[in-house]
Image (cartoon, rainbow, N blue to C red):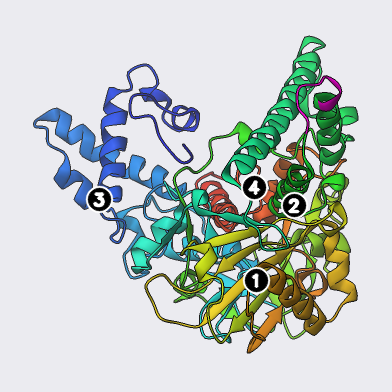
């Protein structure tokens, strides 16, 4: 599981930080496990060294040793965002849970999205001088909750993917924000004529599609094993294989299944396969013919967050407001140039000039690719090449408010239902519909759907009103007596000036290593955060948040080193 520690063994970074405990780990593990247990019992209160010492139940010289080492271990866990993280009061003296660095440089954070606010809050809690510059007139970035339809409908992120150990779940607990678990097994799929897909057809097609994905994974493993046998670098050796798109590989394996006579598919099942393809394009944020078959799921090599997915009916903005509280945030400050040629970094905006020791850049990948911000000196080639290789993906959302709930009779109180496209050409158009009404609350009747894959070209060419008209027409084929929507909106992230995208994906020329390069700092002055810098958890708000914590940790760690004379 992600962000889990084995209670009986030290992690690699723990051994590097505490080499004296490497051979005899029991002492360290007892202290570390105690601190984490205290944090998990109540993450709404700082774990301080005083509390840890009071909880140590030993006597004599051993107790003295535990007391002496408590702050070191607590400081280590705090720096890495394992404890004392999230949305905690900023009034607690950081010396009670952190060994104060010898140097505390000033920091400017570019962007008030979740990664920028996470980094800024962490550093501010540690006693650093931090300033956040945001081009928009609001915080949040690609997290943007809308209340205009009478309930919270996110134009960006609104789902927590895997609640166990997830920092987003932790922050919800700290703020008392309720979560609604999403049950995947309650999704009813409808053909365009309104007929529900039979459970047998659904299971059979789902099994086949997952078998295809398993076969892609086996193909990838063969390529990696071949590279290993040749003593080649795993990321560079598979360059040729990575040029194969996920759509191409799935089609090849599907044809292989048919040619070998293992299976045949009815027209209904063929359409249902397109539904699964569309869902995969939604997850990837791009048409499958642009996604690398080799690396599309490279993050699955690492432990992921488990447990139910959950819906934030109050939206992520509640968490964003909590992260932003007490921070020095300047809105309407569009950064145009970052000059790191001297001892200090100069961050120029459309309004001001800001002098700082270090800068954390949390700009979306597409903004870096478009070179809207000028760096002086120019960023090194290895950095530019990596952010140009990663794909800047996009999906769009459509939300509609109706005078009554016309879908309840067929959907049976499920969180969402699916629409099976009538053809491959219509794949990506309104494949999933989410019921946005808060459970057990008599609120507005709102449906939200997705446009993804090649269907995004339709969004770029069509007005919001016509998109809604086409969506309502589809719903009228699926349900009876569908009224006109009272209100609606359609996102346009691809043309949003300050994002130009939704989330990243592995393009045909990229590999997971590019995420690592994205995360690398330049000259110990320019640091980078955001979902496209997180190899383990890309494409998610949680991944963006953790990248901000990671960069804050880097800056703090460098403050302990003594500069050479």
Q: Earlier in the sequence, mark 3 or mark 4?
A: 3
Give the distance between the C-alpha atoms of the residues marked 3 and 1, in whole angstroms: 32 Å
| Residue 481 left/right relative to 269 | left
Q: Quadrant of residue 34?
A: top left
The residue shown at (75%, 15%) is 225
- Distance from disc 3 to disc 4, alpha carbons, whole Å, reads 28 Å
Where is residue 336? Give x, y as percent: 81, 74
Q: Nearer the viewer, mark 1 or mark 2?
A: 2
Kindly indicate whether the residue at mark 2 contacts the one at mark 1 (C-beta within 8 angstroms): no
Query: Mark 4 to mark 2: distance in Å?
Result: 25 Å
Name which residue lies at 84% across and 33% down.
249
Residue that label 1 marks: 141
Q: Residue at x 82, y 28 (%)?
A: 253
Quadrant for the C terminus, please: top right
Q: Position of residue 463 (x, y in %)?
A: 84, 81
What residue sits right under mark 4 in the picture?
534
* Disc 3 target residue: 41
Circle 2 packing at 10 Å, graded few (<14), some (14-19), many (20+), is: many
- Say if 178 sits above or below 247 in the image: below
518 and 476: which one is in front? 476
Q: Of the two numbered discs 3 and 2 on the same chain, state the one appearing first in sequence.
A: 3
Between 140 and 430, the residue placed more toward the observer is: 430
Q: CA distance from mark 1 to mark 2?
A: 26 Å
Give, as a single range, the part of the protein colored magenta.
258-264
In terms of sequence position, does the residue under pointer 4 or pointer 2 come before the other?
2
Locate residue 255 relative to residue 493 in the image: left or right.
right
Say which residue label 2 marks: 278
Residue 289 sits in which quadrant?
A: top right
């Amino acid at each position: 599981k992600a962000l889990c520690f084995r209670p009986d063994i030290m992690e690699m970074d723990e051994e590097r930080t505490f080499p004296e405990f490497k051979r005899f780990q029991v002492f360290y593990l007892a202290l570390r496990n105690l601190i984490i247990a205290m944090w998990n019992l109540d993450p709404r209160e700082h774990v301080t060294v005083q509390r840890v010492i009071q909880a140590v139940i030993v006597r004599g010289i051993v107790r003295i040793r535990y007391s002496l080492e408590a702050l070191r271990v607590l400081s280590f866990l705090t720096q890495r965002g394992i404890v004392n993280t999230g949305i905690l009061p900023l009034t607690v003296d950081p010396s009670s849970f952190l060994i104060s660095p010898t140097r505390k440089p000033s920091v400017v954070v570019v962007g008030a999205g979740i990664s920028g606010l996470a980094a800024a809050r962490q550093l501010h809690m540690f006693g650093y001088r931090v300033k956040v510059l945001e081009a928009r007139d609001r915080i949040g970035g690609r997290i943007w909750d809308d209340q205009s339809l009478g309930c919270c409908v996110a134009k960006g992120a609104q789902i927590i993917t895997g609640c166990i150990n997830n920092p987003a779940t932790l922050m919800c607990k700290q703020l008392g924000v309720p979560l609604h678990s999403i049950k995947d097994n309650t999704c009813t799929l409808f053909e365009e004529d309104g007929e529900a897909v039979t459970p047998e057809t659904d299971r059979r097609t789902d099994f086949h599609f997952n078998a295809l994905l398993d076969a892609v994974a086996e193909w990838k493993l063969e390529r990696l094993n071949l590279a290993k046998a040749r003593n080649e670098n795993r990321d560079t050796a598979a360059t040729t294989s990575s040029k194969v798109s996920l759509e191409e590989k799935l089609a090849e394996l599907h044809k292989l299944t048919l040619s070998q006579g293992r299976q045949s598919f009815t027209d209904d099942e063929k359409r249902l396969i397109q539904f699964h393809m569309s869902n995969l394009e939604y997850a990837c944020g791009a048409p499958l013919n642009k996604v690398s078959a080799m690396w599309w799921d490279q993050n699955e090599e690492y432990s992921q967050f488990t447990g139910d997915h959950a819906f934030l009916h109050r939206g992520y903005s509640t968490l964003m407001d909590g992260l932003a509280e007490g921070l020095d945030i300047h809105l309407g400050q569009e950064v145009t140039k970052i000059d790191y040629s001297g001892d200090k970094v100069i961050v120029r905006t459309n309004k001001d000039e800001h002098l700082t020791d270090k800068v954390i850049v949390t700009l979306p990948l597409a903004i870096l690719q478009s070179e809207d911000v000028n760096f002086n000196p120019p960023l090194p080639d290895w950095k530019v090449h990596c952010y140009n290789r990663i794909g800047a993906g996009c999906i769009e959302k459509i939300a509609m408010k109706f005078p009554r709930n016309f879908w309840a009779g067929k959907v049976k109180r499920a969180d969402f239902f699916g629409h099976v496209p009538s053809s491959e050409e219509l794949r990506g158009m309104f494949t999933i519909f989410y019921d946005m009404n808060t459970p057990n609350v008599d609120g507005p009747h709102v449906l939200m759907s997705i446009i993804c894959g090649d269907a995004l070209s339709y969004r770029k060419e069509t007005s919001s009103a016509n998109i809604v008209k086409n969506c309502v027409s589809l719903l009228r084929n699926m349900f009876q007596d569908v009224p006109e929507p009272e209100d609606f909106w359609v996102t346009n992230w691809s043309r949003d000036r300050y994002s130009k995208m939704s989330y990243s994906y592995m393009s045909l020329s990229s590999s997971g290593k590019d995420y690592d390069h994205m995360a690398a700092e330049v000259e110990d002055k320019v640091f980078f955060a955001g979902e496209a810098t997180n190899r383990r958890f890309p494409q998610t708000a949680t991944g963006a948040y953790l990248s901000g914590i990671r960069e804050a940790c880097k800056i703090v760690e460098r403050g302990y080193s003594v500069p050479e004379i």
